[in-house]
Structure formats: structure tokens, C-alpha cells
Image (tube, rainbow, N blue to C red):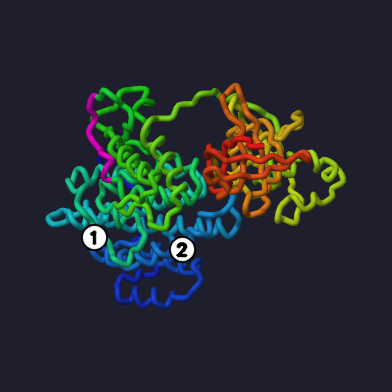
Amino acid sequence: MALNLYIPTLKDNPIIIAETRPQKISQSLIAQHGKNLLDIASFLNSELEILNRQKISPSTRVQALDAYRPILISTAQALSEDYSIAALPLHDKAKLAAAAVESLWLELGYGYKLVLVDLQNQLIKLGTDKSSANAIQRAMHAVAEHALVYYQTYFTPPEHIWSDLHQLYFCAIKLGIQNVKVDEDKSVVGSTSTHANTIENTYKHALLMSLADPQHLTQKNMRLAAEYLAFHVENAKISVVAPLEITTSCFVVDLSSNKPPVPYSKQKTAPNPDSDILLQTLDLVIAIHQDLSSLQNEQLPKDGGIPVNANRDEYIDLLTYLIKHWGVTQKRIFNRTKSQGEVDIVTGIPAIHYFSSSLNEAARANKSPIGKAQTNDLDTPHASRWHIINISAIGMSVRRHPTAEKNIRIGSLLGFKTKDEQNWSVGLVRWASCGNRDRLDIGVQLIAPRAQSAIARINKTGREELVLLLPEIIAVKQLATIVARVGTYEPARQLSITYNNNTHVIMLTKVIERSHHFERIQYSVIS
């Protein structure tokens, strides 16, 4: 398979000659210290764009790329903070940061792909295997990080990303260098390439991040998953196509395509041994199970994949999620039905509390403040209008109207109601998909058909919190639960719950679901 990588066209007589001397590049980078991150990114992008549009020997190009690479990685990591915690659709500052980081990884990938193409076009290739391994691994790393920007902004990655990754890996196989270890610069801190430092590991890392279904993860959890996976990626195995008795934890990769891997069980035709390979994740899932068991037993895994200061509950939830996506293939239970309706949506416990409280009916009618029991926010909550795309028995897909607020995050709690419904239902944002002009589609899972607003006083502290009481749903064997802010749950903790002018004492028994924004907890009534 001849290389047909996504690279820019080179100019024969460039107007500006690229700087390729490492010492001069180092001096120009020192001059950038203290500047605004976006200005540094603009400088790097400009220099790389000049470098990647003219013909230069592979060794000279590598020297220049390697000089720029450490500061490019640190700049990209710093800028990612602006969009990796942002609500959706992205605000202007987050959009600028994401666009800057996307351009940096794109140009860095261009550079190393150009190096590889030049090396492969040389008539005499003796002694080029190590150089080719470096170029392929670093090109792959840049392409994978480029894809991660799309994941963290909930856009679909362009098809050339997968075409490039597959071609780069196939080239490494032909050269027999897929397991050659690539030395990493000590100044590159926190990069996944520090641990996934072979072509095969870098490739598996990219495949597995796609299989983690990132549009269902928060931006923060995407990065945590990428960093955790770098420590365990060797446990995933790539093999040639062969008959399998069990297809669980097995995925098919078509090296001749521009598509991500797909579960073996979802293949409509048998894999093609000439163009397909298998990614098997059983050993990886077993290793994650072991880490999960350690965390549940109040112990930290010793391999360093989970930081010492990590939030244990956060990682328990993340590892449970990864086991499901890298292990047993998820199947849809309910069919979706297209719909043309409209729905009002509010986000967060305070807003749902307000709209679900019968005490606030008069306040809403009079447009008056809702009083002391509400929230720290001085403004009265407002509902946003969304368009329903389709519905199922357990939720719906909806599209944002241009006037709706920009306050959606994966794992957010929503209240929603159509004009014909009396009660506000409670749901959870399961996935998001962004597009141009602030288009945002989200998947909402129904948690409860209604909620009871209440005030909780945590015994022994006297602190009051807004909470939601969700009813028991016998049809799906769902017990009554309480929804509260993150950190509320402690085993056997007692709360005094006040609603409808009555107070009850309850004891918290079990966390049913947790996100970065709330905890849903089973409880028993004491009095």
C-alpha cells in the first residue's frame, strides 16, 4: 500500500525560507517566554507552516521539528485548559484555544509525515529504520492528539485522521519497526507519548480512545482516560485475522479504510485477512478490573497509572465506564422514534429545584424572586427552548435553538418539559455532538418523570442544601432516590429533609450514580 498521507503541497521557490538551525530556533523560543499563550501558539503555527511548505532534507526537518516539539506540547496542554472545562456550545475564548491547539497538532503531524515520505522515497534506505520509527511514532502521536481536540470539543474527527493512522501503522509493519522504542525528550512532561513510546502502543492508544466513545465522557475524563490508558496500553493486543470462538473484547480494524475500529460482533461480513487486523482487549479489561478492585478496597494501584492525589470515586466511575466500552459491546435496548416537538430545558439542581417547587408557582407568575431557599445565584432561573430530534422509552435526542443558554456539560442534570406535560421530568446529559454555528445535539437519559423539591439539613453540621427527591418507579424496579451536590454521600449519613411543610429524617444507604455535578443516592426513612 503506497503512502497517501494528508500533507500540504510543497512549494518549489518559497518566498520565506524556514529557520531550521536548532540553536536559532531555541533563541526564538526563548524570546517567546512570558507572552500570551495564544501569541506563542500563533508564532509556533506560523513557523511550522513555513517549514512544512518547502522542500528540506528529512534530517534537517527532524532537527527543526524536534526543537519546536517540547514547547508546542506544553503550550497545547496549557491552552487545552480553556476548553477542557468549558460548557457547550463553546464560548469565544474556548473556541480560540481549541482552534489554536488543533492547528498546532495538525502542523506538527504534517512535519513528521513529510519526514517519513522523504525517507521512503530515498533510493538507498540503509540505516533509515530508526529515523522512520521516530517519524511514524511522532506523527501518530500528533494525529492522535489532533483527534483528542475534536473529542474534547464534541466534534466528529475528519476522516483523514483515521486514514493517516492506519497507513502509518501499516508502513511500520512493512518495515518491521512497530515495536521499536522511541526515545522521548525529558522536557516533554505529561505527554502520553512518554509511556506509549512505540508505534504499536501509540496506534493502540488512538484506537482505544475512539472505542471509549468519547462523546459520552466529560472533557476532563477524556484526558484522564488517555493518561490512564498510556500506562496499560501494552495489555491490548493486535493480531492478524483468525477464527475466534468468543468475540467479546475484540474489535476489527480495516487498514485500507478511513474509519475507526468497530466491534467484531457488529461486523456484517467476515473480516478480510488481507486488509483487516484484530484489536483484542481482554487482558486490558482484566488489568482495569484489578485497578478497580484496588480502588474499591481503599488501595491505590502501584503502577502509577492513577495519581496519588486522585479522586478515588472519580476513578472508580471512570474505570467502570472503560470496562464497559473496551469489554462487552453495548447494545441498544429501545428503538428511537423521530419527533418534531419542542421541549423546555433547565440545567442543574438549583434550577430544577425552582421549577419543580409548587411554592414557586406564584413567584414565577409574578416574575418575582424565589426567595431564600433557592440558590447562590441572584438571577431567577430561565428555561431554554430545544427541538426534539427523536425519542425512546428511556430518553431523547434534542437540538439547541440559537437562543438557548450555553450551559451544557456531559453528566449535567436536566429538568425538561413539553408544553403538554404538567411535571418537569429529570434527566442526565449522556452525550453531546457539536457542529458549526454553535449547533449542539445532546442525548438525554430519563431518570425520573417528576421531582420533589426539598431542603436537606445535614445532621451534626446544620448546613442546608437544595436537593431533589425522585420517586420510586416500580415498573423498572427503581427505588426512590435523593439527588444532591457532589460530596453529600457518606455511608449511613443522616439528613433532615423538609418539603411541603413536613420534615423527615433519612439515612443515606448507597450511591446509584455520580457525575462531576451531582450524586443520586438511595436512602431509607428513619422518621
Q: Position of residue 491 (x, y in %)?
A: 52, 44
Q: Which residue is mark 1?
A: 183
Question: Left of 293 or right of it: where is 200?
Answer: left
Note whether 126 is above or below 476 in the view shown: below
Q: Is residue 217 magenta?
A: no
Label for residue 78? 2
**Label 2: few (<14), some (14–19) or many (≥20) C-alpha neighbours in 10 Å:** few
Considering depth in this image, is 96 or 126 the residue closer to the camera? 96
Q: Amino acid at mark 2?
A: Ala
Q: Is residue 160 visible?
A: no
Q: Quarter holding the N terminus?
A: top left
Considering depth in this image, is 36 or 458 the residue closer to the camera? 458
- Residue depicted at x 46% and y 69%: 40
Note whether 498 is above or below 328 in the view shown: below
Q: Find the residue positioned furthest to the front.
A: 527
Note whether 463 is above or below 167 in the view shown: below
- Labels 2 and 1: the sequence-earlier one: 2
- Residue depicted at x 51% and y 49%: 153
* Residues drawn in magenta: 234-243
